[in-house]
Amino acid sequence: MYSKKVMDHFTNPRNVGVIEDADGVGEVGNPVCGDMMKITIRVNNNTIADIKFQTLGCGAAIATSSILTEMAMGKRLDEAMKITRDAVAQGLDGLPPNKMHCSNLAADGLHKAIEDYYARQEKRGKGNAKK
Ligand code: FES
């Protein structure tokens, strides 16, 4: 039922944890099942220099979070923004149809973390402008 890649990322998830003083944080919940995910990113030169995830959820959500961190690591922010829910599922060689909703968390969490980074930058810019 699950691909080898799903099982690999579920049993040996990559980049688990939280980045202290992260440059961007994305927290999302899945309305279908109530599972939760937190993505933290470190940004350097508009590029994702580090990314970690914490997921309170099912095996498919853990596997999709794990593959997402691998897909996003080292990417420019605008490229990372283009990582879709489907791309995450495809990165795992697919998910069973009844588990496709689990892949939404990872992509949504990443996009939120990037938006949070942009919002912080904007605030900083405004703060500097006042000085
Ligand atoms: Fe909730 Fe998979 S069942 S994310």
Image (cartoon, helix red, strand yellow):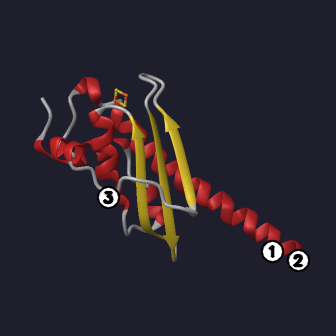
Instruction: Please report contact status of discs 1 and 2: CB closer than 8 Å, yes or no.
Output: yes
Is residue 23 or residue 85 the one in the foreground? 23
**Mark 1 Cβ inside 8 Å of ligand 1:** no
Location of the C terminus by quadrant is bottom right
Which residue is disc 1 drawn over? 128
In percent of width and height, residue 5 lies at 16, 46
Upstream in sequence: badge 3 or badge 1: 3
Residue type, mark 1 in image:
Asn
Which residue is disc 3 drawn over? 71
Q: CA distance from mark 1 to mark 2?
A: 5 Å
Instruction: Please report contact status of discs 3 and 2: CB closer than 8 Å, yes or no.
Output: no
The residue under the point 67% across, 58% down is: 119
Residue type, mark 2 in image:
Lys
Location of the N terminus by quadrant is top left
Residue type, mark 3 in image:
Met
Ligand 1 resides in the quarter of the picture at top left
Instruction: Please report contact status of discs 3 and 1: CB closer than 8 Å, yes or no.
Output: no
Q: CA distance from mark 3 to mark 2?
A: 39 Å
Upstream in sequence: badge 3 or badge 2: 3
The residue under the point 22% across, 47% down is: 9
In percent of width and height, residue 11 lies at 20, 44
Question: In this rendering, is residue 127 above or below 4?
Answer: below
Q: CA distance from mark 3 to mark 1?
A: 34 Å
* Side of 46 where 89 appears, left or right: left
Residue most extreme to the right: 130
Which residue is disc 2 drawn over? 131
The residue under the point 75% across, 62% down is: 123
Is residue 71 or residue 49 the one in the foreground? 49
